[in-house]
Image (spheres, grey):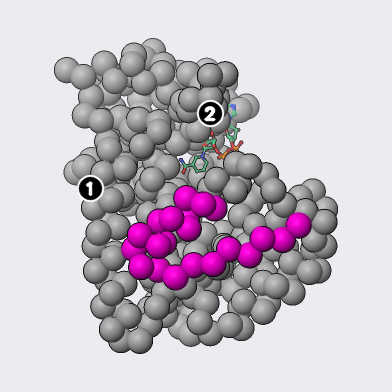
Amino acid sequence: MPATVIDGKELGQTLRGDMTKEVSQLKEQGITPHLTVIIVGDDPASKSYVNGKKKATAQTGIASDVIEMPSSTSEAELLEKINDLNHEESVHGILVQLPLPDHINEQTVIETISPHKDVDGFHPINIGNMMAGNDTFLPCTPYGIIKMLHSYGIQIKGKHAVVIGRSNIVGKPVGQLLLNEHATVTYCHSRTHNLTDFTTSADILIAAVGKPNVIRAEHIKQGAAIIDVGINRQDDGSLTGDVDFASAAEKASYITPVPKGVGPMTITMLLQNTIKAAKGLSRFGR
Ligand code: NAD
């Protein structure tokens, strides 16, 4: 039987509907959740991601502004801007769109954002809290993946989850969150030998590689849940994931499409984190 398709767009809309109600209640209490996004340079893909975030905040009633800085901006100028926003009481969430120009150190930038305004969940303090299983800002894509698994009733506890990819923003944290939920987790990456040996025993398979068709039917255990994080642009301009959807869907129990899978959930969890920041619910208070 073909797999159930996990509709990230629809789930994201449902969650955003609930968030819209929560935002209007917060406004009645005099709190307007506010996200500030900083973009340095004019990379078209980054601009399009920022536009998506702006649209989503407006849809839920979250205030947002975008600070555009030229690619010639020095690291010191960017850090000064972030420090100003750290002290600006009306701003609850700060997001610096990555990647940054080569002359700016991304890690320094991430560590300059106040941990209680770090709605991307990339600050080492928030990463540490995530590892310890403490309530904190979770990185949006891994958070969205866990939300999808929960919403579709896919059991995590006791299952074997295989994560392909070990980046700091997707692979490593999603494995950690699955571990926190009592999965047995295996990480695979570019130096893994015999990938199929690992993937064919996965009950939950997360592909976060960035290469089309790296996962095909022969990699998949019958009945597995497949989460395709990859976003790859094809020659005709269309998007595809890391998984060969047609063959994988014949074997899997659940599968996410690309687009309309993980992508909309990532933005949805950014909104969730912004609301959390506005409520002063980070571990640091306000
Ligand atoms: P990355 O390039 O930082 O990491 C890719 C990982 O894949 C690396 O850890 C590498 O070891 C591993 N890898 C590369 N080739 C491999 C192979 N042949 N076999 C096994 N592992 C291999 O990328 P990232 O930032 O983690 O993003 C991964 C993909 O997810 C990209 O396509 C990116 O665009 C997409 N992405 C999507 C969202 C979303 O919201 N849907 C968010 C973030 C990233």
x, y percent for residue 246: 33, 16
In the picture provided, is 269 more to the left or to the right than 99? left
* Mark drawn on residue 151: 1
Measuring 26% from the left and 44% from the top, which residue is drawn there? 10
Q: Residues within 10 Å of mark 2 (few under 14, many from 20)?
A: some
Residue segment shown in magenta? 50-70
Q: Residue at x 32, y 80 (%)?
A: 27
The quadrant where residue 191 appears: top right
- Does any portion of residue 132 appear in the rendered image? no
Neighbourhood count class around disc 1 (C-alpha, 10 Å): few under 14, some 14–19, many 20 upward:
few
Q: Does 23 appear above or below 198?
A: below
Q: Is mark 2 within 8 Å of ligand 1?
A: yes
Q: Residue at x 48, y 28 (%)?
A: 239
The residue tagged with tag 2: helix, strand or loop?
Answer: strand
Q: Which mark is residue 232?
A: 2
Mark yes or no: residue 49 visible: yes
Callout 1: helix, strand or loop? helix
Q: Is residue 66 magenta?
A: yes
Residue 22, percent from left and from top: 27, 71
On whether residue 17 falls in the magenta region, the answer is: no
* Along the line of sight, the residue nearer the viewer: 214 or 94: 94
Q: Is residue 151 above or below residue 16?
A: above
Q: Amino acid at mark 2?
A: Asn
